Amino acid sequence: MNTAQHAAPTAPMPRLRTLPRTLRTPERIVLTGFMGSGKSTVGPLLAAQLGWTFIDLDSEIERRTGLTVAQIFAEKGEAAFRKEETAALATALGCTHAVIALGGGAPETLANRLLLEQTPATAVVYLAAPFATLAQRCAVQDAQDAQAASPGTILRPNFADPIAAESSFAARQPLYRRLAHIILETGTLTPEGSVAAVLAALAAKAPRA
Ligand code: S3P
């Protein structure tokens, strides 16, 4: 969620892994990153640019279960949420010409990592940003969303405790990085800048070793 992203005069170049040839023309693009990294903001813009479908995995889970993410956490627990997440991811990866935004915790589940690694023609993009930036974006967005929710609703259960969130951020970073074909530092990018950088990275002929 990138409501707090702001324009920067110079955009840092994305860091690339060597892309397998098929990934230069991927059939789907998966956006990963911690809460607040902009997946749900950048994703629809990227999909629109490509003329592709946008799939937000959290929204898919909510549609499939008839519950909000916060309700699933509160009523069934995180483990039940993770099972739904894996089922939704498996379905989403069956789609072509789709941009798929994962929830921030999805790469922690081994089954999800295997699905991502083993689904051909799937480009994984990590939207990276410093923890302080992510926390600020989440605070801004949750304050906006809280207007529409009932009082006291915790919109991001795994950001309710900032200290726990920061240690989860540290633990997840290596997973995000390892899974990613493209690592984009979004801290100073606008959502539109992130889209342009992802497209440029995918088009690049000489990726970083
Ligand atoms: C979570 C991130 C959320 C959502 C759930 C758990 C996490 O998605 O899947 O609240 O553990 O990081 P966003 O990253 O889209 O906020």
Image: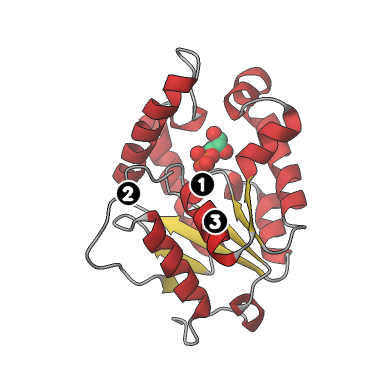
Q: Name the residue nearer the viewer: 49 or 207.
A: 49
> Label 2's element?
loop
- Quick one: label 1 or label 2, which is nearer the N terminus? 2
Q: Quadrant of residue 196?
A: bottom left
Q: Position of residue 3 (x, y in %)?
A: 37, 42
Give amino acid for label 2: Gln
**Residue receiving disc 3:** 31
Q: Are marks 1 and 3 in contact (CB under 8 Å)?
A: no
Q: How is the image coloured?
A: secondary structure
Left or right: where does residue 3 sit relative to residue 77?
Answer: left
**Residue receiving disc 2:** 5
Q: Name the residue nearer the viewer: 23 or 111.
A: 23
Left or right: where does residue 47 sit relative to residue 119?
Answer: left
Determine whether the beta carbon of the residue marked 3 sits less than 8 angstroms from the nearest atom of ligand 1: no
**Residue receiving disc 1:** 40
Alpha carbons under labels 1 and 3: distance apart: 9 Å
Rendered residue at 58%/66% (across/down): 50
Q: Quadrant of the N terminus?
A: top left
Q: Relative to 127, say whether 168 is above or below.
A: above
Determine whether the beta carbon of the residue marked 1 sits less than 8 angstroms from the nearest atom of ligand 1: yes
Left or right: where does residue 29 sit relative to residue 4?
Answer: right
Give amino acid for label 3: Leu
Alpha carbons under labels 3 and 2: distance apart: 17 Å
> Label 3's element?
strand
- Quick one: label 1 or label 3, which is nearer the N terminus? 3
Question: Which circle, 1 or 3, is nearer the viewer?
Answer: 1
